[in-house]
Image (spheres, grey):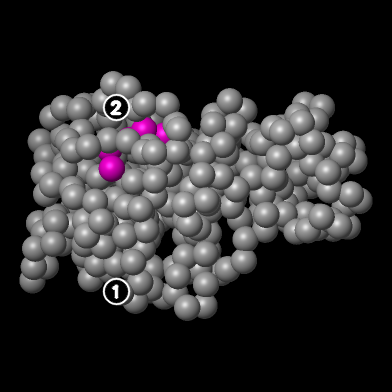
Amino acid sequence: MNAETRETAAAESITGDLDQLSVAFGLGPVEGLQFLDAGMMNRNWRLTSRAGVFALKQLQDVPASEARRSLEALAPLAQAGLPVCAPRRTQSGDVLAAVGDHTYCLQPWAQGIHRNAPELTPDEAHEFGALVAGLHRALSVVGLPEPGERPRAKVVAPQSALAEADRFLVTVDALSVQTRFDEFTTDALRRRKALIDRHAAERPDTEVPLGPAGWTHGDLQPLNMLWEDGGQVSAVLDWDRLGVRPYAEEVVRTAQVWFTLPEGRLDLERVAAFTAGYRDVVALADEALLDAESRLWWKRASDFWQLQWHYGKNDYGPDELWVTGEQLLLWWTQERTQVRSTIVGASAG
């Protein structure tokens, strides 16, 4: 689905809902509505009314019960001084408004800019790590349910990963006309199969991650962060993935997502600064971070979600993630010793 198709579908879905939304949230007449195409899951707009400027979200990818739980946690986080946008409540006091077949939430429009890895200095990466630790601490005391039993993490069997690679090879081979993406995918899948065969013994041998667990954001990627001109985070956005996870999982995943360079390698200086910033606030044992690295590396090696979108949904939004992800995986596999040393703060050489 391309950008124009997404915008058309979004416009059709919200037609007729705006008047009721205005009443539900006490906005007055809606003066402007701009569709935001940056996200791949829910639908988002910038809404302007007499009451102010807001981010409007139509839920598509998260159940209303989970969205309500996440939104309710934001007000105490904001009161604690953390950079989050507390939701605007409806006239009846709810954080969600159900209109027809759709459910919406509304939050104040956050000021700031999106940034990417090369734009962050090591000091800013350090402060970012400290912020993530502060969020984890705050989430443990805002009234969310107790985490319960320890979360488990599925470890995909090598045979299952190889079978999935073969399935996509058959899919691509059956195409009457192949694009450059298809040709790249064929080569990448063959390399991926060889990598899985060669390194299968290095995968985690248990589904129980190491280290402490608790409530985490779940998707601290660049599109979900806004920054002030001075280098401080002005807003942490999109809490749809709020859930209980090992803290080390969020630390390592966030470092990988943020500090993967365009050429397909990790910026190890900033990875080290980020993890050190986190550990300056919240203690995490080396063993927990190394376990999280192993799990994320194997997940990247055994997962093909971007191809499921491309060939299963005809949605090409994640295509670039597939290409850069393959480059990163090859580099990461070759440099794992250095990556692991960096994550725990040892010399990267």
| Residue at screen point 26% across, 62% down | 277
| Residue at screen point 75% across, 59% down | 53
Q: Amino acid at mark 2?
A: Pro
Note whether 303 is above or below 149 in the view shown.
below
Q: Is residue 125 visible?
A: yes
Label 1, secondary structure: give it: helix
User: Which disc number belongs to residue 122?
Assistant: 1
Asked if residue 2 lies left or right of residue 168, the reply is right
User: Which disc number belongs to residue 151?
Assistant: 2
Q: Which residues are magenta?
A: 243-247
Q: Nearer the viewer, residue 134 or 342?
A: 134
* Number of other residues with Cα within 10 Å of mark 1, as a class: few under 14, some 14 to 19, many 20 or more: some
N-terminal of the two: label 2 or label 1? Answer: 1
| Residue at screen point 32% across, 36% down | 214
Label 2, secondary structure: give it: loop
Asked if residue 40 lies left or right of residue 153, the reply is right
Q: Is residue 193 visible?
A: no
Q: x, y (%) of residue 326?
A: 33, 53
Pointers 2 and 1 in contact (C-beta within 8 Å): no
Is 328 magenta? The answer is: no
Q: Nearer the viewer, residue 110 or 269?
A: 110
- Which residue appears farthest toward the front when viewing the image? 79
Q: How many marks?
A: 2
C-alpha distance separating marks 2 and 1: 32 Å
| Residue at screen point 47% across, 55% down | 82
Q: x, y (%) of residue 285?
A: 13, 47
Note whether 57 is above or below 174 in the view shown.
below
Quarter of the view holding residue 26: top right
**Which quarter shows the N terminus?**
top right
Q: Amino acid at mark 1?
A: Pro
**Which quarter shows the C terminus?**
bottom left
